[in-house]
DNA sequence: GAATGATGTTTAAATTTTGTTTAAAAATAG
DNA sequence: CTATTTTTAAACAAAATTTAAACATCATTC
């Protein structure tokens, strides 16, 4: 399911757009400011940002998101249709919709962007695993058996796949998957890593897919 | 994670700003005076200083921080909005916010400064090493092998990288990395230097990356 | 330029921290 | 209510960190 982060301070339009996108089968997180941005920044497939926001504006948020992950498509929304805005907004944005807009138009742009950004990534391989990104099916290439993960295990694994080759701190992982502040010394994440390894590793005691970076966190390499 | 040092003597506003910044995903150390400044001075990514403080005032602290590291961005806070203050404050400060302010405004300025000061530092080279700052990966350019450091080793190396070409005293290094007072004669740091050299130097007995400055400390040159 | 003391290096062992594993309790979904 | 997932807890294992001590090197003085 596609995760969309939508930042919009106007109650009415926010509610309306959120409901519409959910109705089209997307998962939508609607925030009224960029305050809790960090909690979501590494866990979204697309962002829709209003330019005019109190405090941290849409431009800053957009740049922040692109810095965290270059591959997150961004749609900018604006009540203004001035040409200079379009140009400045599009310097990092991937598409631009001016208010007022018809929900079909926004949905069409969102779908187009998702297609553009996801193309060529129908299926990926990590170690002895084959992952079909569209259907979220994981297959063991050796046994040809499908691996079924629980919710948390799946979210955790997805987080690794979205940040391939990066060393992820326990803090990043916990906050990215659980969306809560990580408490130093909490073993919850480690237990989930253990159970995930049990399912995806050939030998869970000698893991090759999820590498432990002692003192820091974990990593999954391509 | 971004390390912010915040010096503010007013309990209420201090608590409030600290919580807000932590909520935005930053690591914040809040001090009510500049007394313990030295413990943190070499280990922060940004400082927020109130101008009116008991004892050592914001200006002096700011100049002290800039002297220690020219690259630490500083935001000055002031209850006064007089123009002359702004000018004097900005002579070393990188931005200036007048009280009262909205937390979003402060956060936006902080983010903007961090972006400005951190730009263009995705990857750097030191000797035969290549360091990717985003993924925290260190590679030996000759063998193409990755070098995995332990937590302390990594922190220590990062400290050197943040202070390239500077001669660092053992005291600075120990207090910067361990955050504790350095005891004259303690060999702990040296042992860690040894193990770090074992991993990053081509010949640990004849180190070229981490240079020993006898009687003072160590240095890593670009 | 050899003796001396001070400072830095190296190695190994002791200690502490961090990560793994298992089991059981608690929460959640069907 | 039952089955499954998630969290908590505790025992265990492994690795990192600190401590300690022997060793080497440099600088100074005689």
Image (spheres, coloured by chain):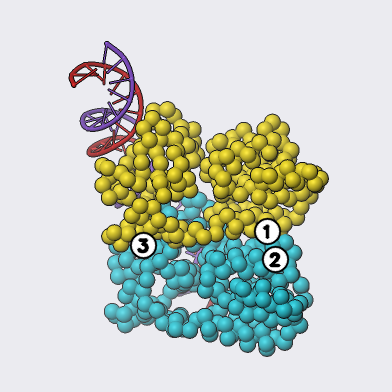
Chain colours: A cyan, B yellow, C red, D purple
Between marks 2 and 3 in the image, the one whose residue lies nearer the viewer: 2
Inter-mark Cα distance, 2 to 1? 8 Å
Kindly identify the residue that appears in the image at 72 percent across and 61 percent down. A55
Toward the viewer: A193 or A161? A161
- To which residue does mark 1 refer? B108
- Lower position in the chain sequence, tag 2 or tag 3: 2
Toward the viewer: D4 or B31? B31
B21 with respect to B71 (left or right): right
Counting the numbered discs, the total is 3
Examine the rendered structure and indicate whether residue B171 appears above or below residue B131. Answer: above
Q: Please, which chain is the residue tagged with disc 1 on?
A: B
Kindly identify the residue that appears in the image at 68 percent across and 51 percent down. B95
Q: Please, which chain is the residue tagged with disc 3 on?
A: A
**In this rendering, does residue A39 appear at all?**
yes
Residue A61, horizontal then vertical, whole percent: 64, 66
Examine the rendered structure and indicate whether residue A62 appears above or below residue B83. Answer: below
- To which residue does mark 2 refer? A57
Toward the viewer: A48 or A149? A48
Q: Residues within 10 Å of mark 2 (few under 14, many from 20)?
A: some
Q: State yes or no: discs 2 and 1 in contact (Cβ < 8 Å).
A: yes
Examine the rendered structure and indicate whether residue A159 appears above or below residue B180. Answer: below
Element type at mark 3 = strand
Kindly identify the residue that appears in the image at 50 percent across and 51 percent down. A184
Q: State yes or no: discs 2 and 3 in contact (Cβ < 8 Å).
A: no
Which mark is drawn over residue A56? none
- To which residue does mark 3 refer? A211
Inter-mark Cα distance, 2 to 3? 38 Å
Residue A209, horizontal then vertical, whole percent: 35, 68
């Amino acid at each position: 399911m596609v995760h969309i982060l939508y930042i919009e301070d106007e109650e009415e339009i926010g509610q309306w757009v959120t409901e519409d996108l959910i109705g089209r089968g997307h998962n939508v997180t609607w925030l009224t400011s960029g305050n809790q941005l960090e909690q979501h920044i590494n866990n979204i497939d697309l962002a829709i940002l209003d330019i005019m926001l109190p405090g941290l504006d849409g431009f800053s948020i957009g740049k922040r998101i692109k810095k965290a992950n270059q591959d997150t498509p961004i749609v900018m929304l604006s009540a203004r249709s001035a040409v200079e805005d379009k140009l400045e907004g599009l310097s990092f944005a991937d598409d631009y919709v001016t208010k007022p807009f018809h929900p079909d138009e926004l949905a069409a742009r969102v779908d187009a962007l998702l297609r553009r950004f996801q193309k060529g990534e129908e299926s990926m391989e990590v170690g002895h695993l084959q992952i079909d990104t569209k259907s979220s099916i994981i297959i063991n290439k050796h046994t040809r058996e499908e691996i079924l993960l629980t919710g948390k295990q799946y979210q955790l694994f997805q987080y690794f796949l979205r940040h391939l080759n990066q060393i992820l701190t326990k803090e990043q992982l916990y906050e990215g998957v659980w969306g809560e502040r990580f408490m130093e010394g909490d073993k919850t994440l480690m237990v989930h890593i253990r159970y995930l390894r049990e399912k995806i590793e050939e030998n869970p005691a000698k893991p090759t897919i999820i590498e432990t970076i002692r003192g820091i966190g974990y990593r999954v390499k391509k």
